[in-house]
Amino acid sequence: MNVQGKTALVTGASRGIGRAIAIELAKQGVKRLLLVARDSQKLAEVAAEIEKLGVKTVTLALDLSQMVEVNIAIAQAWRDYGPIHLLVNCAGVAHQSPFLKSPLPNVQQEIAINLMGMYTMTRLVARRMAAQQEGTIVNVSSLMGKIAAPTMATYSATKFAIVGFTQALRGELAQHNIKVIALLPSLTDTDMVRDLQWFRWVVPMTTQKVAKALIDGLHKESPEILVGWQSYLAVWCQRFAPWLLESVLVMAAPLSKDRQKRYRRLKQA
């Protein structure tokens, strides 16, 4: 896909990967960017930065878990600013805790934003793209959408669901000339993950690297875009030696040594 002269909508655009993708799209020559996030002040800051690059912006302060509000806002935006050619679903949250101690509100928030928020936005935009017989949808999953990890059960579940959702839509929407792509970055240095306990031996990448990988993937029309050598290595290991990868993940996870020892005893039982 050549993004020059196109209109793109990016969710989660106020920070992290979403912000980096919006800025990179502006550098690549999109005509207009619709920026979606909950924080109106941060959205305004990103919009001001993008407008310096000569790209028109529209900010939509929305909570993606509020389906009625999102429906109204997207219908109005489509009417006021014309067709959306590229949708990037990047909004997401991550909570980390052992499964047995996971607070239910955190679990509900991850499902509501990571999964249902993406579903709602995709449904609204894809229907309109189908009517115009043109469009590209990018769903930002994660390496944890391929490889689940201890202490991140719900987050991993939502990201696995995004990969499956994307694969299903790819076949279903092809008849409407809509391409559906999954972007799978590994650990990325963002505000969202800085409060998490990082996994040992994992080297975080920059948001700019993820954004550039997306642009490269769009040009190549890749159905799935893995980012970074660590991702390729992990997926390769998952395919050919899953038992080895599982052991490495337990050793790398921020679990106590006692829990790791108990896990190893259970595996040997």
Image (cartoon, grey):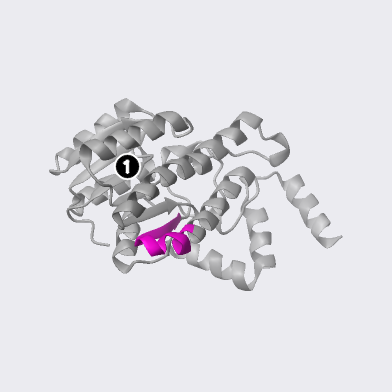
What is the crowding at mark 1: few (fewer than 14 residues within 10 Å), some, or many (at least 20)? many
Direction top: furthest residue: 41
Residue in the image at 17% along x and 48% along y: 31
Give x and y (percent) for residue 264.
78, 56
Q: Which amino acid lies under the numbered mark 1 shown in the image of this protein? A: Arg
Q: For residue 227, which quarter of the picture?
A: bottom left
Q: Is residue 200 visible?
A: no
The magenta-colored residue range is 169-184
Say which quadrant the C terminus sits in: bottom right
Of the pair 5 and 94, the residue shown nearer to us: 5
Of the pair 33 and 76, the residue shown nearer to us: 76
Residue in the image at 54% along x and 36% along y: 112
Give x and y (percent) for residue 255.
67, 45
Q: For residue 73, which quarter of the picture?
A: top left
Q: Is residue 115 magenta?
A: no
Direction front: furthest residue: 131
Up the image or down, 237 lies above or below 89; here it is: below
Q: Is residue 36 visible?
A: yes
Say which quadrant the N terminus sits in: bottom left
Of the pair 231 and 172, the residue shown nearer to us: 172
Total numbered circles: 1
> Relative to 261, is 163 on the left or the right?
left
Q: Is residue 180 magenta?
A: yes
Of the pair 68 and 219, the residue shown nearer to us: 68
Give x and y (percent) for residue 89.
40, 46
Residue pointed to by mark 1: 19
Residue in the image at 37% along x and 54% along y: 137
Give x and y (percent) for residue 53.
15, 44
Q: The residue tagged with tag 1: helix, strand or loop?
A: helix
Residue in the image at 54% along x and 66% along y: 235
Direction bottom: furthest residue: 240
> Relative to 29, is 266 on the left or the right?
right
